[in-house]
Amino acid sequence: MELQMLTCKRSTCDHPQDNEPWSKTRKCLSDRVVTQRVNFSDPNTPQDYSAKDLDEIGEFTQLISVWSDTRSIGRRVLLHHLSKETIEDILLNDSVNKKFQEFHRDITEECGAEDKQHSWAVIEKKEEVVMYGPYYPNYNKGKHSEDIIIRQTEELLESNVTCEDWTVYVFTMNSPCLSRNAEPPCMLKLVQKAKEWWLRFGVNTNIGYNKCWGFKGTKETIFRGVNYSQVEAVHKSENYEEYISQKLTGVNILCKNVYTLLRNLLKCGPFIFDLSLQGLEWKSYFKGMLTIPENAQENEKEFLKRETSRMTEEVKSLSTETCMSAGEHSKRGQAFALDYKFDLQITTGTKEKMRLVFQKCWKEMVQDKYAEILRDILTEDFNKCTNQLFIKDFVQVTSSFLHIGRIDCTDEKQQVT
Ligand SMILES: [Zn+2]
């Protein structure tokens, strides 16, 4: 991966006003980093700390161990989620938020906008601002973008004799993960590093993100059992006992907590969504229609194939980007099948068959999409809740050197529009 290094120098003498532009020069990292290491004392030497420090270190270590046990902390997040009526993001305070917005503008100007996961960081000194990144994950090699940020930050801090009054800003598109295969999750690594950097170099750290990733973001599996049959069963029941008594076949029964969250969510409906599916995904829902040309006479096969393709393409052009509820999507599909102008050569019997199969395929697609929307909402709320609980747990023992929160981009968006 190509390393990028941006240095934005802001001399307090040359540019006394905040709104003056910083002069920017791009430098290669290898030109910049001083390899000489300063011999710092061992950060874990207890005699250097006050009693208050020791208390905090003890509590901090305990919290790290609690959050390393993702299975039990996951249960705690679920209960926390159940006890909350509204889930709110924890935002960074105004001044830190403003800094992130400024740096974000600079990075975007230099490197372009980016929606995918990436990270960059800034070390703010009195006389200059050093920006580095953006860095991208390489999941094939098991590397997350935060790994590079940690390594680079550490090298930069270690290459300076004094880092007094410096501030580290770490941006990551999605909040650092809280669950990771084979190695400690990025959030725990970063929090531990922030503590270490504070003890060794006296620097403060701010971690800002755009989206809550929770333990593992969109790959969260806790709600994967929520399919349309479950949604219907939950919808019909008044309580968990009634839900179980329906004796659902072919599905895994939801646990009580997931049941309750889904039931609470359903009360907030109807949910509006569109059926914009990728080409292949769209086609796969109408595979059932291919049985009609397959079972037709040899001389009709090709012709009927073209007709099924024309029908599914026509409904696609009418449906994408049209937001409505599941019920409305269903009605729209049924009406489309009834009004569809079949080729005049098709017999009445075949038309009827095609309509019926189309309606069945359509219904399954709408139901699947509806269940997916619900799973996405549940997952997003769960991830938000995870971050909320994590930050609340750690804020007590890290507030003197670390701030974590979502970056509020509302001001920036208003300026753009
Ligand atoms: Zn990670």
Image: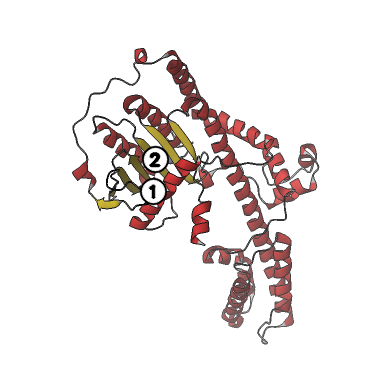
Camera-nearest residue between 272 and 181: 272
Q: Secondary structure at mark 2?
A: strand
Q: Can the viewer see residue 181?
A: no
Cβ(mark 1) to ligand 1 < 8 Å?
no
Q: Position of residue 47 (x, y in %)?
A: 35, 12
Local crowd size for mark 1, using a 10 Å CA cut-off: few (<14), some (14–19), many (≥20):
some
Asked if labels 2 and 1 touch by Cβ distance under 8 angstroms, the answer is yes
State how many labels appear: 2
Q: Which badge, 1 or 2, comes first in the chain's sequence?
A: 1
Q: Residue at x 36, y 24 (%)?
A: 199
Camera-nearest residue between 256 and 198: 198
The residue carrying mark 1 is 103
Where ligand 1 lies, by quadrant?
top left
- Horizontally, residue 196 falls left or right of residue 354, namely left
Q: Position of residue 103 (x, y in %)?
A: 39, 48
Question: In this rendering, is residue 158 above or below 300?
Answer: above
Q: Residue at x 53, y 64 (%)?
A: 278
Rendering quarter of residue 35: top left
Q: Position of residue 197 (x, y in %)?
A: 35, 29
The residue carrying mark 2 is 169
Rendering quarter of residue 334: bottom right
Q: Amino acid at mark 1?
A: Phe
Question: In this rendering, is residue 128 above or below 22?
Answer: above
Camera-nearest residue between 384 and 348: 384
Q: Amino acid at mark 2?
A: Tyr
- Horizontally, residue 351 falls left or right of residue 237, namely left
Colour scheme: secondary structure
